[in-house]
Structure formats: C-alpha cells, structure tokens
Amino acid sequence: MADLAIRALKKSYGATPAVRGVDLTIPAGEFAVLVGPSGCGKSTLLRTIAGLEEADGGSIEIGGRVATDLRPKDRDIAMVFQNYALYPYLTVFENVAFGLRARKLPDAEVRKRVGRAAEMLGLGPLLERYPRQLSGGQRQRVAIGRAIVRDARLFLFDEPLSNLDAQLRDEMRGELKRLHQELGKTFMYVTHDQTEAMTLADRIVVLKDGLIEQQGSPLDLYERPRTRFVAGFIGSPQMNFIPAEVAPGRGLRLSDGRELPLKAGRLAGIAPGAVLIGLRPTHIARAGAQPPATGVARLSVRADLIQPTGARAYVSFRLGGVETTTELEAREAPRLGEEFAVDLDLDRAVLIDPQTDRVI
Amino acid sequence: MTEAGVHARTGTEAAAVPSPAAAGIERPARRLRPRRRTVVLALRLLAAILVTVVFLFPIYWLAIMAFKTADEIFAYPPVWWPGSLNLSNFAVLFRDGDWETVRNSLVLATSSTAIAMVLGTFAAYALERFRIGGENLAVWIISQRMLPPVVIVFPIFLLYVALGWVDTFHGMIVLYVAFSLPYVIWMMRGYIHDIPIELEESAELDGCSRWQILWRVVFPMARTGLFATAVFTFVFVWNDFVFALVLTRTEVVTYTVQVTHYFGGQSNFWAKIAAMSMLGTLPVFFAVATLQRYFVRGLSMGAVKG
Amino acid sequence: MRPAALDAPRIRASDRRFGLLLLAPSVLLLLLVGLFPLVYTLVVSFQQITLFEVDTSFAGLANYRMLLSDERLWESLLHTAILFSIALPLELALGLAMAQLFLERLPGRQIFIALLVLPTVIAPLVAGAVWRLLLDHRYGPVNQIVGWLWGEEAVLLWTVNPLLVYPAILMAEVWQWTPFMFLILLAALTNVDRSLTEAAEIDGAGFWLTFRKVVLPAIWPVMAVALLIRGLDLARIFDVVYALTGGGPGTMTETISIYTYVLGFRQFETSYTGAIAFLVIAILTVLVVGAVKRMGLAR
C-alpha cells in the first residue's frame, strides 16, 4: 500500500514557481530521499507535504487519506528540521515530550514513550539538560527523538545532517539507516548531498526546477541516468562529459580527430551529429600490457593535475577539448606532465544528445 | 522483531486514541479554503485601518486645529474639516516672537546631541574594547537613566543658582549632555560590539594610531548606529519638559514650556497651543522618518537588534 | 559576547591609559549631574531648609519622620500606582494584540507601521496638550463622538470631574505608548525562529499552547525590557498629567513626580523635598532590582 501519494502538486511563491506539478508515490516503509541542487524545490515539496505550506494545486494522500487540506497536526506526520528547532528553555525530556503533551497524553504514557525513544537514541543521561548544553550531534538526536515518540505514519527530514561536521555526519547517517530499519516507518528525507542520498535511500527522487527529473533505486540512477543532469548529479567524483561526433559505421570522433571504436550495434538508431560521451572516472583505467577488449578505446594522454586521496588518486587530463578525470590506484598514478595510456570503457558510457540533454 | 518494533506497533494504537480523525468521531480541522482566507484578510485589513485611524486621529485633530480660524475653533459642534488653509495662527507666533522658543529647542537639542555623541562614543569604545571598569561601570552608567528627572533636577537647580547657570544655554547644554550620555554610551557600546575587532587590529598593523583607528575605522563602521543614536538623542532633548520647566525663565525657554504658557485657568489659547505643538512636532516626525530599520533597536535600548 | 577572560591578556597598559582618557569626560559629567545631586540631596535632607529659613544644622531624621505622616505623599504614591497598574497591562495587551494583527502579510503593512510610530515620538507634554484639545467639554470631538454613541448631547468634564480624570489621563498615556509596545513586540515576534512554531504546529499544538509554550518564552527577554522601560517611565509620570490636569482637581491626580515638583519649586520645602527624593529613589531601586531579578534579566 502506498503511504504517500502526491498528484500534480503545485506550489508558487508569488510569481516564482517552486514546485511545478509533481507526481510521486512512496510505498509504506520505504526510505525515500529527495535530492537536488539548492532552489530545486525539494524543501518546498517537503514542507507542502508537512502542511506548513499550502498547495496551490494537486493533492496529497497520506496513509490512504486525502490530506491536502488538513492541518499539519492532523496529517499523522513527524518532522526533523534542519536547525533542529529545539525549544531552548525546555529540557531534553520536555522537548521530546512536547508533542505528546500537546496531544494531552497521560503522564505515565509520556514517560514511557520518552524513555523508549531516549533508550533507542542513547539520550538517557541527557534528559535533564538544556539544548545549549548539548553538542551538535546530541541536539540532532533530540530532534530525532522528538519525531519518533510521536509514532507518526510518515517521518519527514529536512536536511537534518547539514549542520554537522563530516565525521559526525557519517555516524548519524548510519544511525538514521538503522533507525529506519527498526521503526519500519516511511521516511521522506531531503538533502542536497548525493552521497547521503546514495547511502540512505531505497528510492532516490531527483528534483530539478520544481519537477522530478528521475526517480529510482540508487543503483538504477547511477547505472541508468536518463538525463545529463542526473548523470552529472549522482556519483562522485562527477561524471566526465566529452564532446564527440558520431562517425557512421566507425564509432565516435573526438574534436582532436581521434576515433573511438564502439561495439557493433551500439550506434544503432543514433543519427549522425554531435553527442556527449558521459563516462564515470572509475570507467577510465590506466592501460595494461594486453590489448584492449572490444568496446574499450585506448588513448594516450598527458597528466595535467594529480589529486591524491590516499589509496586512490584523481588524475586529470585534456580529452576532446575538455578536462577529464579518472580515478586510479595511487600506485598506478602517473607523474605530473607524464604521457600515459588510458582505456575508456565505452560499454559503460552513456551517450547524451547535447540538444535535449537526454540520454540516448 | 526488536523491542523497538513492538513498541512502534502498540504506539500506533495509542496515538490513534487522541486523534479524533482516526476514531471517526469528528472531522479533523480543515485548513481555510481560499474564499475564507480572503475574508479573513479583509477583516484583518479592516481592523488595521480602524486601529490606525484611532491612533492617528489625535494628530489629525492637532493639525486641523492649528489651521482653523478663531470662529472654527469655537464652533459648536466642532468643525472636523477646516474651510481654508488658514496660516494666521502660525503668523501670530512669528509676529510675537514665540517661535524663538522653537529656535531655542533647536539650538539646545543640536549642540547637546553633537557633544553627547562624541563624548558618549569615546566612552562606549573604552568600555567595550578596553573593558575599563568592567560590567559594573557600564551598569552604573545606564542606571543613571533610571533616576526621575524631577528628583535630579532639584539639587541641580540649587547648584545652578549658586553657579548662575539658571536660564543659560551652556547650563542647559551641560545638563542635556549629561542626561543623554547614559543612552548614547549604552547604545554605542552595542553598535561597537558589532564591529569585527579584526578590522581594528588590521588597522593597527597597518600603522594607524589609536585616534586614527577611532576616526578611520570605528566611526565609519558604526556610522548608521551613530546616526540612529543621534536622532534618538535629539528627540529626547527636543521633547524634554521637566528640566526646561525648572531651569529656564525667559532667555532659553523651550517650545514645550512655551506650550504650557498658553494654558489658562478658564480660557485656553487653543490656536496657539495647536500651532506651537505642530511647530514642535513636525521636526520630530521628519527626524524619525529617517531612521527606518534602526528605529526599534533605538527604541528598545538595544533589546531588539535590527 | 566574548568571554572577558579570553580578552583580558590583550588589553595593554597603554590601551588602558587611552581608554581612561576617552572615558574621563563622560564619567566626570555623570558624576557632576548624577552623583553630586544625590549626595547633595542626602545632605540637605538631614537639615531644615525651607523657603523662609536656611537652617543647615543637623536635624537628624526629622524630615524622614515627616514622610510617615504626610498623607498627601502617600496619596500621590497611590495615584502613581493606580496609573501604573492600569496603563502598563493595558499597553502590553493592546500592543501585543496589534503586533499579532500586523505580524503576517497585509497590504500596506509598512505604511501602517510607519504611521503608528508617530504618537510615540511626540513630546509627552504635547501629547497631554493634544488630549486637552480633544477632551474639551465643548469644543473637543470626544464629547461629540460620545454624544453620537449615547444618543444625546454629552457634556463630560474630563479634566474636572473626579470620575473622569483618571480615564482622561489613561487615554492620553495609553494612546501615546501602546505604539511603543506594539513596535517592540512586533520586532520580537518577527524574530521568533519560525521552525520552532512550525515544529509545534506539527507536534499538534494549537494557537494558545504554541503562544504560551513557544512564542512567549522566545519573546520574553525583549518583552521584559519593554515592560521595564515603560514601567520606569510610568513610575515617574509627569508631563502628561501636568498638561492635562496639573494634578487636579485638588490633588486627585497628583503623582509622586508632580508632588515633588510642587514641594520643591512652588513651596520651596528644600530639605523635606530632599527626603522625598530619597524615598522615591529607594522605591524605584527596590522595584527595578526586584523586577530585573524576577524577570530573569540580570546578565
């Protein structure tokens, strides 16, 4: 059963459209991540689902019930805010209990539920403290605690990790994933960080300019992006986009005249003309001793820039007139300015029509 | 299933009880539909207009009184809309020399504001950056503002009689400067606090002397704060009544004191009261109109930052 | 604010000298106009100086003993307390309601706010004079409006009738200072972190609960300062009363400030005025210190 069903949802701020007609269905228990660059409308979409913004058009169903016109408190949702939104003058306990008290639950029940949530999140020793006495990670846990005691059907997260430092962010990411598995509830999570999206999501929804660009499992989006935007957005380091010409019957020709042979049939149905080759850095390898397999092009390039990251190194070179990056084992990395041979795994490349920016 | 999972399921049932929607007892509260929203907005607008009219009416009445002819002033029932723009009430004030009290107010307010701003900003800088006297000195200074004017003015009056300073410009200016200083120091300390200290440190490394740092970095950086504080100080002095009432006689009478001279036991000089009040009020309106976003910060003595 | 301890080592001896130089003129002036009068008043209050006689011998607590039996003094304190305890809550409640009205989007909001500022910046004395015009029993519009509502001609002697003088003073006072409360509270409400109220909304809190538990604690520091500023001004209220009733009829609306003025400058009871001045300072100090502690403002 779908826990969240959105149809043709629209929302503008004055003349500026923020969400321009979104259809989205999230099955019960799924961890869905809304991702996109800033200004793509992802936060607005989340806030509209929460009922903090009123939709201009379309409908929202939560748990099979039309919620478009319901007040936030009647929507059976809980939300974790980017800045945590903790009440500074209430203790951790009272912060977590706030929603239960607002619903006039008996005191014993409040204690029981806050106790359970505190146990799950390791907040036990902090319950009598005030938010200002907590570290960033602890505040984050309190904010999550406040959401989970409510035991809502749908949990909304608005960039909850963006205020944490890198190490804490990794830690909390793992914890959120564990929490989702334990609670078995539907999560809707907004972030601009594609790594967060890839590691957390059952389903990633990529938003651009107020519209869904593509949605699917993380692997699906990584392997089969449908547009240049998704191809570039998902994956780190970013995918390379190398301009080329389709040379009928031969393969692809780069702007410096070098030709890249393709497997037979790969070009079937593709009209002659300009294309972009989308190739991930991991799909460019340093050439070995044996000749390249079919569908792999071997080229000689010169290293312009080397960025070691420890075990691996990013090596950049110019190809087809653009800066292109590959990810190599640190020991395979060339020296700066050295000529070396690379193998482009064209089988795994995507071809993009530069006119429409869609994957062919 | 983990313990937490069990809790989650039982929790759903518990949550359903307080939610009337799930129990089907009554429909959950719906958000306002667009038409209702328009109605609410219209009602709010109506209330806003009503409130504004009520609060502005006395000022409107003052303004029309100042322009009424004698017949209109003493018409019964009162005239709500004067027949002509009659300037004779103001002309009388200028003919008889009463307007000089406005000039006195202007001289006093301008010079005391200028002096208080310079001295007060120096003091604020010393308090904020060098922490001289710590928090105690700062609190003592602001507490000076707490004293009731009527109480301070009494011994000051005795002192001024002894010094021969009663009814003199310099006597009034000294008093107004001292009276304004706590406010200026308090506000400027806040504005100077907002200036990143790195700017002053880098100026020092660039070879500026302390005075140069003050003139070239602190004053320019705090200029909007200086301006806002100066306008408020000007208005406080301009609007003063108690000090002027006690310490002036004939030479430096201010416009507020002059207004009370028109009050009579039986008959009031309505036209003069209104015209003089208008003369005294318009400059304040203009001054305040220049303040914009620093208004609330100045009004709340820094409790609200702009 | 930076912790003072971290800053302390930075302050050099030459900085200190420069700072003292900057501070000296202000401190001297404040001592002259702030501290000197207090000390002088204290000294005088133990002597017997009146209009007719300058007796500077030590009179002990004679003047202070007189305070206890001075009915006019205690009545003036009562009058001040009446104005204080009616005007302050009224200004707060009206200011808060107006701030709520203008908090959300409204066409012409900025213009309304700019106009509503005006009463607050007028000289209090002029405000009193304006209400004198408005409340005149024959030529003022207030009685005319009351007449329309009442259905028959109203001849209310606002500044003379014992039943009406307090409403008259309160009208002028509340008119002038409600906008002050309004502006400060509006700024405070605007500064409340929106995600806090949104979180409360999602948590299911209604308007009142959100206001009490979320908004009020958030605006309290600012609201307390506004109450303190207004409370102090009300405790020494002078100008409006002077302009409207002059303390009359009789001494019915004589506030403590008016009484001090009359004693000191009309009757020249120099020493006794000194004693009253100290009583006033003592009362105000106790009130302010108490208020600052109660409201949790000490910083």
Image (cartoon, coloured by chain):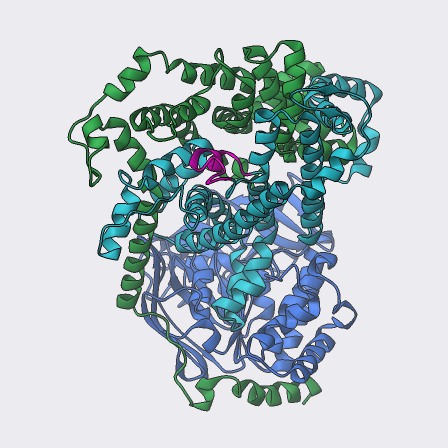
In the image, residue B245 sits, relative to residue A66, either above or below, namely: above
Q: Residue at x 32, y 71 (%)?
A: A58
Foreground residue among A341 and B231: B231
Foreground residue among A207 and C28: C28
Q: Quadrant of the N terminus of chain A?
A: bottom left
Observer able to see residue C108:
no
What is the display colour for chain B? green
Give the x, y percent position of residue C117: 41, 39
Give the x, y percent position of residue A193: 56, 59
Magenta residues, start to end: C237-250
Foreground residue among A129 and B256: B256
In the image, residue B167 sits, relative to residue B256, either above or below, namely: above
Colour-to-chain, blue: A
* Residue C148 is covered by the magenta coloring: no
In this picture, residue B235 sits left or right of residue B205: left
Q: Residue at x 59, y 77 (%)?
A: A100
Colour-to-chain, cyan: C
Q: Quadrant of residue C74?
A: top right
In this picture, residue C188 sits left or right of residue B268: right
Give the x, y percent position of residue A7: 35, 74
Observer able to see residue A42:
yes
Give the x, y percent position of residue C150: 26, 56
